[in-house]
Image: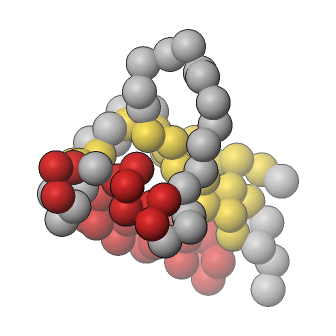
């Protein structure tokens, strides 16, 4: 599976970043750009979730059962996104 590394320093409102990622994923699925499926879009950077009280996504995702705990990374906090586009 070929990765498409978009950036390691994406910033902004999370919902806006998600819309851009969804658009790129559709472009991959429909037109094979920037990669043909199967592929994975990879990006990092610190996005902001202003919808959540106190900017606390940990409590939100734990409450709905979707919290992913990676354990200690020994690095600074950085959001990581991986969007899998499968062959249709």
Residue 20: x and y in percent read 36, 65
Q: Disc count in the image?
A: 0
Judge from the rendering whether residue 32 lies leftward or rightward of residue 54; answer left or right: right
63 vs 44, nearest the viewer: 63
In front: 25, or 11? 11
Would you say 41 lies left or right of 55 here? right
The answer to whether residue 7 shows anywhere in this view is no
Query: Along the horizontal axis of the image, is 46 left or right of 77?
Result: left
Q: Is 32 above or below relative to 61? A: below
Return the residue nearer the eye: 84 or 25: 84
Residue drawn at 37 percent across, 55 percent down: 59
* Residue at (60, 22) in percent of width and height: 72
25 w.r.t. 35: above or below: below
Q: Is residue 79 visible?
A: yes
- Locate residue 16: give its quadrant: bottom left
Instruction: Identify the image quadrant of residue 33.
Output: bottom right
Return the residue found at the far top: 74
Picture coordinates of residue 49 (x, y %)? 24, 55
């Amino acid at each position: 599976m070929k990765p498409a590394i978009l950036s390691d320093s994406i910033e902004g409102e999370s919902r806006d970043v998600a819309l851009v990622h969804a658009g790129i994923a559709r472009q991959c699925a429909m037109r094979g750009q920037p990669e043909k499926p199967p592929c994975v879009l990879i990006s990092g950077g610190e996005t902001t979730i202003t919808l959540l009280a106190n900017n606390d996504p940990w409590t939100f995702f734990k409450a709905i059962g979707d919290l992913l705990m990676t354990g200690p990374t020994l690095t600074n906090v950085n959001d990581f996104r991986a969007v899998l586009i499968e062959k249709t």
